[in-house]
């Protein structure tokens, strides 16, 4: 493709993907809003204790979908049709396996898991209900993520975006209906969320009915080489989501000690707004991935690098707008989720919003750079970034900074960690570019 058409395709794919991922993030944000209105601070606390598990489910679906779709896109660009079908079939095998694990966890162990996540007697029943049904709906969440990735990589980004948006808007409408007119409580919130991926999958069915798909289920054995490659390529997507879940679990435990259930409710507001901002960055990374993988597949690293630059420019613009908006309107944003006018919640959430979202630019850079490494099959730097963000740096930083500066330290953990990872990412990217230039010579 020429540079001009490359830029046009970049905007087409990324804008559609961002709209879709924004819609998906509304799964949880809609729950947060309606639960805060219908069930108050206890409901918000229960929701925030359960949400990290959703990050694991969603991240697993993205890992399988992004890993499989990246390999599919590379094979498709190289005209390896039969191999592409084998990749898709093994991706579905993997989705079924992980779905079964999450389903059994919800069926057998939801209450012990709720207690492990910190639910006390005041919020245990609501946390258990939300966790159980979220895990029972995990096959729909995972399969939806897999199909969205493959449809997007099969030159149908519009359909992928439409399915994501319709599913998300259905969730918002059903949230209201189930929680208020039907008085279904916390079960209504998760039931609405669980139906959303089912609706999304149904919306994608024309891709197969009209035979637009170039990937097919085939009689294929489980191929460990394909599964290993998919898990390796998709791991950064999993780690990006798991890092959010790990952060929430660690923060919940520390904040429970510092500020109790009110502090967890305030953090719930911040964490769920963060999911929306991260969804934009994820949308950019997912949207540009098919183009990057295609250029990489035909050996055009220059165009792949151009797409990375476009992505970072878009991310920087979004980050500036997001942070300025949150800084200026922190008080009314917190008030929207504070139906009981809890002064303690407001006192904790407002400065938290302004400090926590200092991380925006660094988070965006790390997500997009990790996605770029995955798209060009540079799995080691992608894994390093993901592990640093999700595990190695943020966990000790959370305990250290909260011990030194209390809640202020908690809010600064995320920006400081993401800044350190961004510096490491920049060094690794320069190293990758240097190696590529040496090979071209």
Image: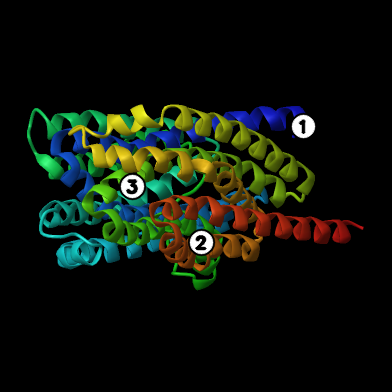
- Whole-Å distance between the Cαs marked 1 and 2? 31 Å
Q: Which mark is residue 3?
A: 1
For marks 3 and 1, the one nearer the N-term is: 1
Q: Mark 1 or mark 2: which comes first in sequence?
A: 1
Task: Name the mark nearer the viewer: 1 or 2.
Answer: 2
For discs 3 and 1, the disc positioned in front in the rendered view: 3
Element on which disc 3 rests: helix
Label 2, residues with CA under 10 Å away: few <14, some 14-19, many ≥20: many
310 vs 406, nearest the viewer: 406
Q: Are marks 3 and 1 in contact (CB under 8 Å)?
A: no
Q: Secondary structure at mark 1?
A: helix
> Label 3: which residue?
267
Q: Is residue 200 left or right of residue 420?
A: left
How far from the left and from the top, in percent, is residue 423? 67, 55
Can residue 328 be seen at all in this image of the molecule?
yes
Q: Nearer the viewer, residue 91 or 429?
A: 429
Please determine whether, in this image, residue 7 is positioned above or below residue 106: above
């Amino acid at each position: 493709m020429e540079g001009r058409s490359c830029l046009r395709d970049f905007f087409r794919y990324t804008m559609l993907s961002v709209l879709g991922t924004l819609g998906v993030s509304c799964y949880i944000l809609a729950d947060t809003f309606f639960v805060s209105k219908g069930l108050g601070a206890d409901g918000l606390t229960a929701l925030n204790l359960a949400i990290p598990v959703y990050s694991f489910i969603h991240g697993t679906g993205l890992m399988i979908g992004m890993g499989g779709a990246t390999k599919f896109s590379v094979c498709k660009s190289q005209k390896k049709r039969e191999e592409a079908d084998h990749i898709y079939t093994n991706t579905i095998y993997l989705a079924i396996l992980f779905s079964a694990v999450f389903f059994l966890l919800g069926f057998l162990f939801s209450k012990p898991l709720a207690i492990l996540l910190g639910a006390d007697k005041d919020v245990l029943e609501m946390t258990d209900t939300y966790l159980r049904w979220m895990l029972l709906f995990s096959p729909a969440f995972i399969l939806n993520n897999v199909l969205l990735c493959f449809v997007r990589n099969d030159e149908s980004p519009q359909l992928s975006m439409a399915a994501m948006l319709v599913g998300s808007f259905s969730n918002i409408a059903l949230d209201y209906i189930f929680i208020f007119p039907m008085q279904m409580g916390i079960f209504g919130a998760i039931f609405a969320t669980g139906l959303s991926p089912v609706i999304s999958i149904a919306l994608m069915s024309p891709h197969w009915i009209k035979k637009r798909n170039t990937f097919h289920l085939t009689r294929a054995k489980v191929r460990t080489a394909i599964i290993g490659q998919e898990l390796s390529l998709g791991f950064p997507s999993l780690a990006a989501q798991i890092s959010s879940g790990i952060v929430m679990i660690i923060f919940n435990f520390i904040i429970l000690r510092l500020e109790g259930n009110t502090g967890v409710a305030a953090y719930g507001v911040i964490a769920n707004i963060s999911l929306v901002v991260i969804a934009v960055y994820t949308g950019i990374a997912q949207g540009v991935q098919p183009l990057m993988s295609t250029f990489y597949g035909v050996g055009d690293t220059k165009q792949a690098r151009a797409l990375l630059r476009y992505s970072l420019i878009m991310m920087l613009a979004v980050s500036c707008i997001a942070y300025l908006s949150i800084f200026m309107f922190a008080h009314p944003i917190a008030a929207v989720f504070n139906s009981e006018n809890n002064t303690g919640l407001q006192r904790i959430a407002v400065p938290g919003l302004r400090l926590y979202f200092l991380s925006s630019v660094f988070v965006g850079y790390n997500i997009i750079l990790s996605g770029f490494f995955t798209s060009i099959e540079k799995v080691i730097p992608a894994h390093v970034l993901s592990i640093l963000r999700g595990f190695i740096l943020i966990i000790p930083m959370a305990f250290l900074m909260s011990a030194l500066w209390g809640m202020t330290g908690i809010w600064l953990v995320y920006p400081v960690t993401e800044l350190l990872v961004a510096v490491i990412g920049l060094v690794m990217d320069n190293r990758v570019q240097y190696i590529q230039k040496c090979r071209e010579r």
